[in-house]
């Protein structure tokens, strides 16, 4: 086992990980920073972000308005101190990227253009056509690659954290190219491993969004927060298993139609219509489908997204990526054809429990970006708030980890834990002659989540789902990886990811059973009302030797008392 030492190890090279690396590097040039990523950095899910990044930049908008939209959008579960901090810091991040050469789309006066996204009451989404994440990633990666104290470990796969007495010591990482496990000794570790919607089968998330970092933290005893809060985005492309059609399409003027040709959003959100928050629009679509006003196809029921009235030219200029997606994945031209869409599993509001400084309960361990839960988004995230979150809290994590690393020395990593991790991976999974197959268990897990933990949930379905996931966890013990070689063994990586996802699915279902109310993205048909008296709290879930444990945290309210949520 080779050892590598670094002051800060960052797991993840998406927007959050890269922003953290640049911030730590700028904080002190003597700190050496390792950025570990299972994919090449610019293949992280962040490149898929199409729509935009929220920031208050114009007169008429204000921090309070952005904060209020976010808090109301969250169905009052967001921690308001976090929201207030975030809205004030977001504009600086947009300017920071601009200074690095980010090609933001511009208005007629040459200023950074902005448009309105769901649940926002002002046009505050900055964008680069509909390739926002791609350009943000290339801008950040370009900068980070030029900084001498950052070393990239691309196509390296983190498997576990090494902690002792509540303090981080390092982590274990497999170099996918050689298949060898390495011990990374680190004074501080930042997890920036992204979301986990690949636990569902109909999803907009990349195949790599398997929640590894969330499961790794959970296994190390770090609590996960609000795991029941999984977001369903209203416009997943139906023939393509949920690939995203950005909210930007509705922001440019796209309509949603049912099979009667009605713009049904008028019934559900008369003021904001198609630009109501995602939970509201997704539920409206699903209701239309359940009440037989959806369209039928060989790919299942759907709702139509109509962009035809925007015309060929506008679509080409403002939504070139959507045009390409429709052509390549569905054989459609949005200037002439209706786009078949339905809700798609899109985002994890829950994740690793951190405070506003991105600190976890383990000293020296931080988390930022989609894998973390601050909680900024509460029960429902607004579009464009996530890339902004990755930038704001990526920077916070980089600076906090740098301060911590400068104050602490290396301490010995617990070698017994390294050894047992090697045994788990190489003897327990790679070496095992089992009879179960990874793709089969994975498919059953995803179908279970789709069937039992979708938009409308109830106790019976959630219990059924949980029972099935626990059976799959048992079956996983007999899983075989057919390729026994070490070099670039993608079968082994898929098995490790599935193992993580089974833990995540279990925590989502358990937390969803626990929360006996309906709030934001979490709707319990058996408890249809929001219940502020009992449930204005965050759920915390812990992995312990005795099994899953729960706790609750109060929601921080600064200015905005919960009121009825109407759009
Ligand atoms: C299709 C789509 C469109 C979106 N559009 C928008 C938008 O317009 N605006 C907006 O604000 N938000 C948008 N979002 C949400 C937003 O893009 C994401 O929440 C955000 O980019 C996540 O960034 P991240 O840095 O946290 O993680 P990611 O970009 O997901 O990166 C995760 C990183 O962790 C690494 N990693 C994971 N596990 C391991 C492991 N075991 N070992 C080593 N490395 C590991 C990966 O290699 C990767 O580098 C969109 C999301 C999707 C899916």
Image (spheres, rainbow, N blue to C red):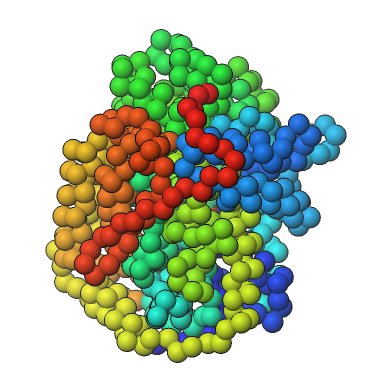
Q: Is residue 260 left or right of residue 144?
A: left
Query: Who's the residue at 19% across and 73% down the image?
Result: 432
* Residue with the most extreme front position: 533
- Above-or-below relation of 75 to 405: above
- Above-or-below relation of 25 to 331: below
Q: Nearer the viewer, residue 428 or 332?
A: 428
Whole-percent x and y of residue 565? 49, 28
Whole-percent x and y of residue 264? 45, 15
Q: Is residue 390 left or right of residue 329?
A: right
Whole-percent x and y of residue 462? 23, 42
Query: Who's the residue at 42% across and 63% down the image?
Result: 213
Q: Nearer the viewer, residue 297 or 183?
A: 183
Query: Who's the residue at 56% across and 58% down the image?
Result: 356
Asked whether residue 538 is in view, the answer is yes
Query: Who's the residue at 50% across and 20% down the image?
Result: 269
Asked whether residue 450 is in view, the answer is no
* Residue with the most extreme right position: 109
């Amino acid at each position: 086992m080779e050892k590598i030492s670094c002051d800060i190890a960052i797991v993840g090279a998406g927007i959050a990980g890269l922003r953290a690396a640049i911030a730590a590097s700028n904080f002190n040039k003597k700190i050496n920073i390792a950025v570990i990523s299972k994919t090449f950095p610019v293949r992280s899910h962040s490149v898929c972000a199409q729509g935009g990044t929220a920031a208050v930049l114009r007169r008429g908008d204000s921090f309070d308005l952005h904060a209020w939209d976010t808090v109301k959008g969250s169905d009052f579960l967001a921690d308001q101190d976090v929201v207030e901090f975030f809205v004030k810091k977001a504009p600086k991040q947009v300017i920071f990227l601009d200074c690095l050469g980010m090609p933001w789309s511009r208005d007629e006066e040459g200023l950074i253009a902005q448009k309105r996204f769901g649940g926002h009451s002002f046009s505050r989404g900055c964008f680069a056509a509909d390739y926002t994440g791609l350009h943000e990633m290339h801008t950040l990666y370009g900068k980070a690659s030029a900084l001498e104290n950052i070393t990239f470990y691309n196509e390296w796969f983190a498997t576990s954290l090494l902690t002792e007495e509540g303090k981080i010591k390092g982590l274990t990482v497999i170099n996918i190219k050689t298949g060898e496990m390495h011990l990374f000794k680190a004074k501080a570790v930042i997890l920036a491993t992204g979301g986990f919607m690949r636990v569902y089968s109909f999803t907009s998330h990349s195949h790599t969004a398997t929640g590894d970092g969330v499961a790794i933290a959970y296994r190390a005893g770090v609590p996960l927060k609000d795991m029941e809060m999984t977001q369903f985005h209203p416009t997943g492309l139906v023939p393509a298993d949920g690939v995203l059609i950005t909210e930007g399409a509705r922001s440019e003027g796209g309509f949603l139609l049912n099979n009667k040709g009605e713009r049904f959003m008028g019934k559900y959100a008369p003021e904001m219509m198609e630009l109501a928050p995602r939970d509201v629009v997704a539920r409206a679509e699903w209701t239309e489908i359940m009440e037989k006003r959806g369209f039928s196809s060989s790919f299942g029921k759907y709702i139509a997204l109509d962009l035809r009235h925007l015309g060929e030219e506008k679509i080409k200029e403002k939504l070139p990526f959507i045009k390409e997606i429709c052509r390549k994945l569905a054989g459609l031209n949005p200037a002439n054809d209706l786009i078949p869409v339905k809700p798609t599993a899109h985002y994890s509001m829950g994740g690793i429990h951190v405070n506003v400084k991105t600190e976890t309960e383990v000293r020296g361990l931080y988390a930022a970006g989609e894998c973390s839960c601050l909680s900024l988004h509460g029960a429902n995230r607004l579009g464009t708030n996530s890339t902004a979150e990755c930038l704001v809290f990526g920077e916070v994590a980089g600076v906090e980890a740098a301060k911590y690393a400068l104050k602490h020395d290396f301490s010995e990593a617990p070698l017994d834990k390294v050894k047992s991790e090697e045994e788990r991976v190489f003897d327990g999974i790679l070496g095992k002659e089992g009879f179960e197959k990874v793709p089969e268990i994975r498919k059953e897990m995803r179908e279970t989540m789709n069937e039992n933990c979708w938009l409308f949930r109830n106790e019976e379905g959630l219990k059924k789902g949980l029972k099935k996931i626990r059976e799959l966890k048992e079956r996983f013990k007999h899983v075989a990886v057919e390729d026994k070689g070490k070099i670039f063994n993608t079968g082994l990586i898929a098995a490790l990811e599935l193992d993580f996802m089974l833990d995540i699915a279990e925590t989502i279902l358990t937390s969803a059973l626990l929360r006996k109310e309906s709030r934001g993205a979490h709707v319990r048909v058996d408890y249809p009302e929001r219940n502020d008296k009992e449930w204005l709290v965050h759920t915390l879930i812990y992995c312990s030797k005795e099994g899953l444990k729960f706790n609750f945290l109060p929601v921080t309210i600064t200015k905005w008392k919960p009121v009825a949520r109407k759009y």
